[in-house]
């Protein structure tokens, strides 16, 4: 990794972790509430969060922090309670599409290249 672990960078990563958990919980609720549109809304929210993590840190570590928060909230909400029932219902294919779609979006955002930071020259190269 080329950047140093400063306190500001660690705070940004912890913030992305918390935002990932909140986005995961909200996405779980929306997917079950409005299936086709809710799934798209939840996936767009994940894309925005992962892209913001990529841009704010400049590396895939920001995407990883947000993805860990999202995945932990997904797992915690899918575990059965001691009474034997689930906190939220997860019937249907929507939750599997949310899990696979969110994972695919995280991989895409973590491996994408951002715009270069160097200025672009207006001079054409000679042929």
Image (cartoon, helix red, strand yellow):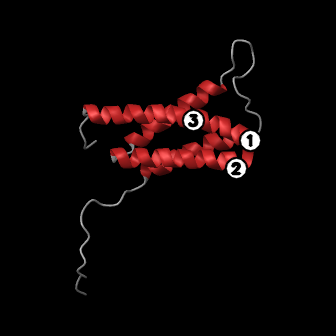
Residue 107: give x, y in percent of width and height.
49, 47
Gap in angstroms between the C-alphas marked 1 and 2:
14 Å
Vertical position of residue 92 compared to residue 36: above or below: above
Extreme bottom residue here? 127
Residue 35 sits in quarter: top right
- The label on residue 93 is 1
Q: Residue at left 46%, top 50%?
A: 109
Please say whether residue 68 is visible from this viewpoint.
Answer: no
Q: Is residue 94 left or right of residue 52?
A: right
Question: Disc 3 designates what residue?
Answer: 24
Query: Distance of mark 2 from mark 3, alpha carbons?
Result: 16 Å
Tag 2: Cα neighbours inside 10 Å, few (<14), some, or many (≥20)? few
Q: Earlier in the sequence, mark 2 or mark 3?
A: 3
The reply to whether residue 97 is visible in this rendering is yes
Q: Quadrant of the N terminus?
A: top left
Q: Tag on residue 1?
A: none
Cα–Cα span, label 1 and label 3? 17 Å
């Amino acid at each position: 990794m080329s950047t140093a672990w400063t306190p500001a960078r660690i705070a940004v990563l912890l913030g992305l972790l918390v935002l990932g958990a909140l986005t995961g919980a909200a996405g779980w609720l929306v997917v079950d509430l409005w299936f086709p549109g809710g799934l798209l809304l939840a996936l767009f929210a994940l894309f925005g969060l992962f892209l913001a993590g990529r841009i704010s840190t400049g590396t895939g570590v920001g995407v990883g922090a947000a993805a860990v928060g999202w995945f932990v909230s997904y797992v915690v909400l899918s575990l059965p309670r001691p009474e034997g029932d689930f906190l939220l219902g997860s019937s249907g294919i929507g939750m599997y599409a949310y899990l696979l779609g969110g994972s695919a979006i995280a991989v895409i955002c973590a491996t994408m290249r951002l715009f270069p930071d160097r200025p672009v020259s207006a001079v054409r190269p000679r042929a």
